[in-house]
Image: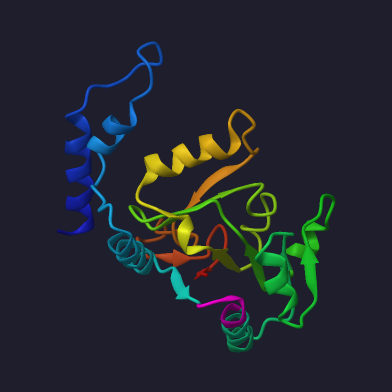
Amino acid sequence: MNERENIFKRIREALKAPAHSLAGGLPTVAEQRGVMPAVSSEHEAQMALFHANSAELRAHIVLVADMRDLETKMAALRDEEGWKKVAAHVGDLSITTAQSLGLPVLITHPGFDKEELATCDAGITECDALVAQTGSVLVTSRSAGGRALSCLPPHHVIIARREQLVADLPTAFEQLVQKYGGNYPSMISFITGPSRTGDIERILVLGAHGPKHLTIFMV
């Protein structure tokens, strides 16, 4: 099945479900799952699906055994791409890893210089969840150090824990509700592969409106 046929298949599936008005209430989780591709409840199957979807989207997944392995593989990526400066936020995983690279690190505290951020080779962030169903990464302004860190540097590096992998989008939204309650972050975004556009003569261009590269380290 090509991508065009896949899109029409999803549209046909979605049309089988009745539309909801705000007065009638939002669709239940079960109803949402009824119009979306099913995902296995097995963790290994979810991991394989996340890998497959991410690879199709041109994101790079790297499994690491522990923090030492993470720092070693991040250093290899630094050397491969010739990074001179990186940016990060103060997270349990992100700041320690960024500082281990032996490079100048811009920390995105409130009031940081966004022009300096644009000169960084990579932005290192954490996330709220990884979604097997779509190969997406759920980030918020709190988990990813604000709005700009995941957008301005040409390489977005996400450090996630393996237990952050969830089966589908409804589960990711449920986790947002549980984590933030009524005090939601100012930005909630699903990152699905590196930035891209196909508007110019139907030629896929990566990095048109954001990072050209997306690497996800799973600890």
Q: Position of residue 85 (x, y in %)?
A: 74, 76
For image coordinates 35% across by 13% down, the residue present is: 24
Q: Quadrant of residue 3?
A: bottom left
Q: Position of residue 68 (x, y in %)?
A: 61, 81
Q: Quadrant of residue 51?
A: bottom left
Q: Who is closer to the viewer here, 2 or 35?
A: 35
For image coordinates 47% across by 63% down, the residue present is: 162
Name the main secondary structure of what is drawn in magenta. Answer: helix
Q: Position of residue 10 (x, y in %)?
A: 22, 43
Q: Who is closer to the viewer here, 194 or 70?
A: 70
Q: Say if the magenta span includes residue 87.
A: no
Q: Position of residue 210 (x, y in %)?
A: 57, 59
For image coordinates 47% across by 66% down, the residue present is: 206
Q: In the picture provided, is 152 more to the left or to the right than 12?
A: right
Q: In the picture provided, is 69 more to the left or to the right than 97?
A: left
Q: In the picture provided, is 10 more to the left or to the right than 66?
A: left
Which residues are drawn in magenta? 65-70
